[in-house]
Amino acid sequence: MPLVSGKLLLEKAHEFGFAIGAFNFNNMEFLKAILEAAEEEEAPVFVQTTESAIRYAGIEFLSGMVHAVKDKYSIPFALHLDHGKHVETVLLAIRHGYTSVMIDCSDRPYEENLEVTRKVVSLCAPLGIAVEAELGRLGGVEDNVESLEEVLVDPDQAKEFALRTGIDALAPAIGTAHGAFKFKGEAKLDFERLRKVKELTNLPLVLHGASGVYYEYVNEINTYGGDIKGAKGVPDDDVRKAVELGINKVNTDTDLRLAFIATLRRLMSEERKNVDPRKFLKPAMEEVKEMVKRRIRLYGSSGRASLF
Ligand code: G3H
Ligand code: 13P
Ligand code: ZN
């Protein structure tokens, strides 16, 4: 059971109360690392590409790789469009065999977000393709310009949005941010808000900006010429708590990037005579694979392939 609809993955995770890892890729090395890790963990998984990944590699390469290898793996997995901002990108993804999409109009006025999302659901539902949408804004508060109340999801609005759009999954903003610099001080997620959104929508929920930004990788990058001092992520305990409260898909990109870059930086500094890129890329790919396994275990999806 290899490439399946995102609907199937989301429904099972919602029913059994665990979360499925959704990992970003832009190239062969990340895709292979993710699928091999999921296969070894016997875990369902989402492999996902953003619009900027599509601009970087071309959708033919990204979807082509997935479709070329899909029968090599026995775990169920979905090919997902992450943060699709335009209906045109959703149509492109549909034409290239994506089985799940996110339409992210969370930066537009509520009614516009709702209308575009409804349109995407009307295009995807007849094809059995899952639709995820976002409410509230990720990235937190910038120096008191906005209050948290203004940028985090409103649970009552989430209920109305779910009913009026017919989405399969909702990404509620509860205080996380994308990238390696998530919090200025202590990590702070609004768990009570998450609990309310789950209760009122009874939908599969998605946590974005969930990377742990582990110290060992930050340190390795800083040691070998990088400069990401002050990088900070979501503690593992907070991710576990979010899953307990109803998160069913956890998006992770930064942790994979950090594992890859830390390894590349160290090896390029240590092996100064090497000019064969594969001697750098292979160990970096292995490190990404280990990170994916670590995250899959954290989300509680190891061994869950047997549910499908
Ligand atoms: O939104 C998720 C990503 O971590 C950002 O990805 O650099 O491919 O746009 P991107
Ligand atoms: P991180 O930057 O925390 O890995 O979040 C990735 C994400 O949410 C992709 O949609
Ligand atoms: Zn995201």
Image (tube, rainbow, N blue to C red):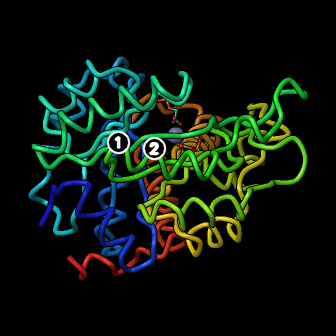
Indicate the quadrant where residue 11 lies: bottom left
Splitting the image into four quadrants, where does ligand 2 fall?
A: top right
Q: Residue at x 52, y 62 (%)?
A: 200
Q: Nearer the viewer, residue 1 or 134?
A: 134
Answer with left or right where residue 266 lies relative to residue 44: right
Q: Can residue 87 be seen in this view?
A: yes
Image quarter of the C terminus: bottom left
Indicate which disc residue 26 carries.
Answer: none
Occupied quadrant, residue 181: top right
Q: Which x, y percent locates residue 197? A: 57, 59
Up/down of 126 relative to 91, above or below: below
Image coordinates for residue 157, horizontal then vertical, percent: 56, 45
The residue located at (87%, 41%) in the rendering is 184
Report x, y in % for residue 63.
19, 35
Mark 1 element type:
helix
Q: Are marks 2 and 1 in contact (CB under 8 Å)?
A: yes
Q: Can residue 259 be seen in this view?
A: no
Q: Give, as a three-letter code, the residue at label 1.
A: Thr
Q: In this view, does 181 lie to the left or right of 260?
A: right
| Residue at image location 10% in from the left, 43% down from the top | 127
Residue sitting at 56 percent across and 48 percent down?
172
How many residues crowd mark 2 within 10 Å: few (<14), some (14–19), many (20+)? Answer: many
Helix, strand or loop under label 2? helix
Residue 278, compared with residue 39, is above or below; it is above
Q: In which quarter of the image is the N terminus?
A: bottom left
**Disc 2 and disc 1: Cα gap in Å?**
6 Å
Residue that mark 1 sits on:
165
Q: Is residue 303 above or below residue 26?
A: below
- Residue to which mark 2 is pinned: 161
Q: Residues within 10 Å of mark 1 (few under 14, many from 20)?
A: many
Is the CB–ligand 3 distance for label 1 below 8 Å?
Answer: no
**Residue type highlighted by circle 2:** Phe
